[in-house]
Image: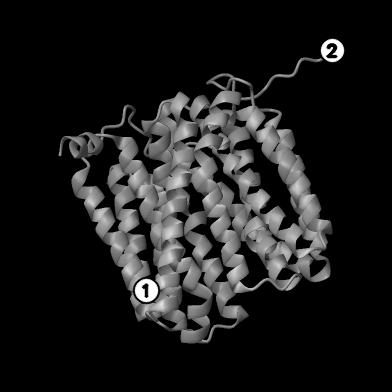
Amino acid sequence: MNKLQTMSRSPEIMLLAMAFVMPLTFSVWNALLNNFVVEAAEFSGREIGILHSLREIPGFMAFTAIFVLVLLREQTFALLSLLVMSVAVAVTGYFPSVVGLYATTVIMSIGFHYFETMNESLTLQFLPHSDTAHFMGRALAVQSVASLFAYGSIWVLMGQLEVSYKAMYLIAGGLGVCITLLIWFVFPRFELHTVQHKKIVLRKRYGLYYALKFMSGARRQIFMVFAAFMMVEKFGYSVAQISSLFLLNYLFNLVFAPRIGQWIAKVGERTALVFEYTGLFIVFACYAVVDTAWMAASLYVIDHFFFALAIAINTYFQKIADPADIASNASVSFTISHIAAVVVPVGLGYVWLVSPSAVFWVGAAFAAISFGLALMVPQQPAPGREVQRFRHA
């Protein structure tokens, strides 16, 4: 009992518990989506495209989270967002129609994106600078455990016990609701050290952070949308093979993400980001010319490794930010990254029809631009030292 009481007084344990809930429910929703919409609602490419566009709108509108904080504490808002997401996942199976799936997807996405915004803000406020990168690595490992559990549950319940879509969605969402309510009642309302601004705050000195976030969103879309699609279209990967790659990525996070966080804390954000973007440039260039299935799969796993280094963008911002700006800029940064999420897949989708390789050369160009931005990050970021000053000879 004493150990439980001690854990309940730790905001870090609460953040890790919340980090477990999100992928537990979202992974089930995401894994079942394509099969469910085709079998239950006879979706075509048009409807699934609209659904994903609708799913991104709440991310684009993430800046509105700051206005909700006029009424709610950040911790309360984060937990309410988890509840909204979990309830939407739980009821998805009860609305097997085009309109019903659009509605539940939007509600799920509202909860998902508001939670992600508040979770980032709370992490940057609760953790001291020296511990943040390592903690974010631990959080990635916890998320991987939850995702592995979710995928394993699908395999057992649906693959072996023939549980229905409706029941699987209900189990996942219901479990998310129960764990979130447990977090709500077990943990106290933790006090934040600094009162946050309750308005949109954009500062010129955060310009490099905004640029890094935008480019991160653009690169991530190429990875999420086109890398896996290439392996299916070009190399004929099956659902089982793609799922195996997802599982391999989650296992990697489970083992290595905490160590990546420690490494970032040791070498600094500038070194970590330069290493990430150098690696991503090579990976995207290899995507453009790869002609064997096993090499494409290897690139996909390596690609996922480099994206774990994006922790450094958040810790860079934590070090340069006015503490009162963190909540506002967490919401703004989600909107900035989702500008790319709205534009990049559509634009590069047309490029793909002409030349799939060109899509990945664009990704390499994005990585090169990001490399240039990373060189502008100081070795020791701090307020007043947001950008590296280069001396002219």
The residue closer to the viewer here, 203 or 295, is 295
Q: Residue at x 75, y 49 (%)?
A: 283
Residue found at the very far left of the displayed protein: 1
Tell whether 120 sits left or right of 185.
Answer: right
| Quadrant in which residue 352 is drawn | bottom right
Residue type for callout 1? Met
Q: Amino acid at mark 2?
A: Ala
| Position of residue 113 measured from the top left corner of the image (x, y, whole percent) | 44, 54
Q: Which residue is mark 1?
A: 168
Residue 108: x percent and y percent?
40, 64
Q: Which residue is mark 2?
A: 393
Q: Secondary structure at mark 1?
A: helix
In the rendered image, the vertical position of residue 181 relative to residue 13, given as above or below: below
Disc 2/disc 1 C-alpha distance (Å): 65 Å
Whichever of labels 2 and 1 marks the residue nearer the N terminus, that label is 1
Say which quarter of the image contains residue 80.
bottom left
Q: Residue at x 60, y 72 (%)?
A: 239
Image quadrant where residue 221 sits? bottom right
Q: Looking at the image, how many numbered discs can be counted on the residues?
A: 2
* Residue 182 on image: x %, y %: 22, 52
What's the residue at 74%, 19% (across, down)? Answer: 390
Residue 64 in view:
no
The kind of secondary structure element at disc 2 is: loop
